[in-house]
Image (tube, coloured by chain):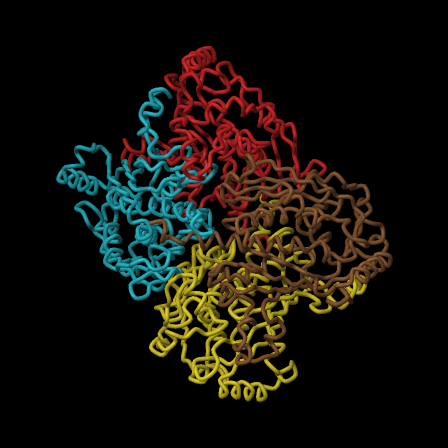
Chain colours: A yellow, B brown, C cyan, D red
Amino acid sequence: MRGNSFGKLFSITSFGESHGEAIGAIVDGVPAGLKFSFEDLSRELKRRAPGQQKGTTSRKESDTPEVLSGIFEGKTLGTPICVIVRNNGQQSADYKKLKVEHRPGHADRTTELKYGIRDHRGGGRSSGRETIARVIGGYFASLVLPQLKVIASISQMGKLSKSDLADQVICENYLETLKNDGDSVGGKISLSLDGTPVGLGEPAFDKLKADLAKALLSIGGCVSFSYGAGEGFFSKSGKEISEDSGHFGGIEGGISNGDNISLELGFKPVSTVGDKAKEGRHDPCILPRVIPVVESMVKLVIVDHFLRQNAYQLETKL
Amino acid sequence: MRGNSFGKLFSITSFGESHGEAIGAIVDGVPAGLKFSFEDLSRELKRRAPGQQKGTTSRKESDTPEVLSGIFEGKTLGTPICVIVRNNGQQSADYKKLKVEHRPGHADRTTELKYGIRDHRGGGRSSGRETIARVIGGYFASLVLPQLKVIASISQMGKLSKSDLADQVICENYLETLKNDGDSVGGKISLSLDGTPVGLGEPAFDKLKADLAKALLSIGGCVSFSYGAGEGFFSKSGKEISEDSGHFGGIEGGISNGDNISLELGFKPVSTVGDKAKEGRHDPCILPRVIPVVESMVKLVIVDHFLRQNAYQLETKL
Amino acid sequence: MRGNSFGKLFSITSFGESHGEAIGAIVDGVPAGLKFSFEDLSRELKRRAPGQQKGTTSRKESDTPEVLSGIFEGKTLGTPICVIVRNNGQQSADYKKLKVEHRPGHADRTTELKYGIRDHRGGGRSSGRETIARVIGGYFASLVLPQLKVIASISQMGKLSKSDLADQVICENYLETLKNDGDSVGGKISLSLDGTPVGLGEPAFDKLKADLAKALLSIGGCVSFSYGAGEGFFSKSGKEISEDSGHFGGIEGGISNGDNISLELGFKPVSTVGDKAKEGRHDPCILPRVIPVVESMVKLVIVDHFLRQNAYQLETKL
Amino acid sequence: MRGNSFGKLFSITSFGESHGEAIGAIVDGVPAGLKFSFEDLSRELKRRAPGQQKGTTSRKESDTPEVLSGIFEGKTLGTPICVIVRNNGQQSADYKKLKVEHRPGHADRTTELKYGIRDHRGGGRSSGRETIARVIGGYFASLVLPQLKVIASISQMGKLSKSDLADQVICENYLETLKNDGDSVGGKISLSLDGTPVGLGEPAFDKLKADLAKALLSIGGCVSFSYGAGEGFFSKSGKEISEDSGHFGGIEGGISNGDNISLELGFKPVSTVGDKAKEGRHDPCILPRVIPVVESMVKLVIVDHFLRQNAYQLETKL
């Protein structure tokens, strides 16, 4: 496969270009008999949709999901679930001017180098719209482990610190100024996981921290990952660290220990700047919209590892 | 599988506990006809072996590789290559005292929670000796892409900065003091990749940065990963970033662009501290020994993606 | 995953229940730049659709494909291709009477045992309609290796021999009588592959014959697989066999040798018999409609192995 | 990977050439805490070893297993189990004469075509010795599901029918005559599985019959696979079949129904004939030695599917 599937026992296969017919996901490995709510799925997708905040993109994306398979009489069948979202609101005409320009830090140039052809309609597979597939997957993951609470929050956005971020007026003015300047900023997201079952992660390559890192670095714009004490791990000695088990961020030896898991991610500024960025449809900062995507990727990892660990629990079966 | 294999077309399957008979790897997907050098493989393993530096562990580990398959008359056969390293020097008796104690931040406790049984001989699969398998894999990866140059170096070690690290006396005294105190430190490793082919990495989940993050976070003690401008991504705006393509660290849209790829990793202090750490066989800092492991994991990722990309190049075939 | 994906480098992921919204496939691993023809895809799907022959099901299934992703300006993008076929013609009301009855030899009972719930609308994932996904995959496989010619033909159908089968009147009368009797028959299909590249298949588990067997036995109703001389392998001695290389059916040591590959498959009678079978929508023999499915599965295997072999061809690359 | 691994949750990775240092397997996915018996493992390997019967190869292969990892104090650790068997008894000198000759129906020629190089020492990966890895895997599979009884028996050997086969004198004379003539024969093996858990197999590609077919066709020399009523499926009508559920061979809709599963396999005559075949070390018929290999492959499939099914059983966990 060409990297469009994620997960071993609970997996999503993502498809769709930003300006094609539809974006969607096949979610495979959802156990049978779980209760499905169209409203909950739609709400999750809405959290990711553009146009929710002043200063953010003015695109109208309704992002209404359509369930094609795997659900019957309000419950999961245990068969693959296909959900699509039509790209109705896309006007690829607007993107035609990109035909000759490559945005630095964006996939435009490398995609062309890779495939030998160019989809000049827009971001193609590398568009932010591909994250719809991830949010769909995250919703179904939450059905398997409802006790798992994953909360992401912005801890830094450009020059705004955590306290600035608490004030929505400061935030929105900052984003509006960036938008007017055709500029963009990156920042940091903190993640807190409660309710992770004990014993998830494998001792060698599939350590829980490794699979979380892969999941999160697979999000466009994500440039760094750390867990636990972060910088504290480098400034403190082993003796100091060992006094406070909280430093280990819920993962020891790559395996979950049942404690709260804490992660921090860094995101670079979005690539589209200058006059193009002023025209509309471009966010000066993706952090607000990336929140549900980040949470979804974490859920996919935890649920996949939960099923993997469950496979080897035989006591009650034999 | 239980996470003991890494890579899709160029893969290693790792096996062995630190105090079992042997540690080893099966390297699968090595093309046929590549020249094998026992000396080069041994040299790589020696770089990882303990006892190379003052202040580091006094364990005697000869780490002599034994090739069981896949090589014939000095060349690769295209069949799976099995290399083992016997655990001759291990005295598991010394580790018996760990039977009741769990080291914080170590896999001891979580491994027991996961499997329901305890291998009290030592680190088991979570031991640093498991990294032998990775160095074996890295050696064979370098046969496939000899033009790829991966260089890792320590950029911070506990309180020592980059300039301190250049002075070996300062370094060795620092490590010796830590050893005598039964203490340990973490630090940072910088990685530079030259010669990565263009177009590696997939647009969705298997972005090159994502697979590099997974590979490196799968190393025991690694707690953070970043690429490109690092902190610069958060302090600078999109306009500032776009002026210098070097910020993107050789990866755009998750796909290699042919530029030098730069990564930075953080490592936490080793878990064994106090009297146990003074007794011998424990390093106060794993950074020096982790260098070849880090380089090997990067090579495994690049070569695997190189073969994956090669699979779809059909022009010259049809 | 739960067995809804097939292939490693060229893969299809199948989804959809027979009486749900749609049946479809994601085809991943199609190289970029190949010319797509909507007409050719539709024609392949039509070969599989019901109602083509007297005595066969009277269901009206238009089976019009809808391409949701992966195609742009008439060419493949190298991104995952999603094609769906709506289940417009399905009247699940008719299937409600199945709610309490299980058909012997059909998935009804085992599916319920497996998932703990019942989709009483009809065949669900085990319906013949699931094969739409396979025909979609087969069409795209043929774009990668146009020189590969795969031809399946019925060599036995119930009591009809090969010579009877040549006479369409005999055939249609036979099927009509079975239909009126509410009875069904099985039979045999012969497959001939021309143009298979040399060197496909791996020496251990992924022998070409093994992957062909899996692909074909994954089709509902298929109960046997053989290649090469078939019964001749058991009645003749090694000396006799070695005199005629044609016996080996194009595969030696599990690897293709460039010769014509010959396979034979057996199919059991369809499970629905009696009054239910008379009511319409049920074929007395699935062989005529299974032909394009069988051909598609073979193409998927050959193209997947072709890309796998191509991955390791480095001469022209380095 | 290059097809040297088999199984998803319970997997074996096979390595070793017939005339290299060793043949072996890594068995991954064995749950922790299962009781290991060196004697039982050795006994299984002995069943496969040559020289057990008059008329069979006179090679002396001790085939003593050496366990390198995954076992501690007589129990499985849950970590990968590596077992090797040294190739002590091999005299590759004898095989040098094969350097220029290719045996028809053997991997000699296709392997050379595939890899571009030749291992003229003998069968290489395509040797019957590779099956040692499979028997090792089968032994560990039997620890997971001890209630599963898999019994293979020869139902036809060249011209000998089932009743002839019951008489060991007839058998041994027949094999001895073939050996003296430098000739070989194929035949058929019947398989009976008792104790397969209900609900194994997936509705689409990973039907139980499909994975069994792949497993068994991956054995060198196997040319056909059928399950259930076999030829009865083609001579009887659907009505006749539906009267006797035994026809379905324990699998309905690709999923196990708890009944006895019956399979039949065909094997071609071994490729080495003429003077070479008289020289020793070559069996005139591989059926007697293939019995434990066939049983092992079946166990691997059933146990893998058992763990896969177990992964999704959540009732008792949440």
Residue D130 in the image: state x and y as whole percent. Answer: 52, 32
Residue B22 in the image: state x and y as whole percent. Answer: 68, 39
Residue at x 40% of width, y 72% of height = A122
Residue C153 in the image: state x and y as whole percent. Answer: 24, 39
Nearest to the observer: residue D254 or residue D297: D297
Q: Is residue D32 visible?
A: no
Nearest to the observer: residue D251 or residue A9: A9
Relative placement, left or right, of C1 versus C158 is right
Nearest to the observer: residue C107 or residue D137: D137
Nearest to the observer: residue D196 or residue D163: D163
Residue at x 44% of width, y 23% of height = D154
How many marks overall?
0
Residue at x 47% of width, y 78% of height = A272
Asked if B270 appears above or below D75 in the picture, the reply is below
Q: Is residue A61 visible?
A: yes
Residue A136 in the image: state x and y as whole percent. Answer: 47, 66
Relative placement, left or right, of B64 versus A289 is right
Q: Residue furthest left?
A: C169
Relative placement, left or right, of D183 versus A48 is left
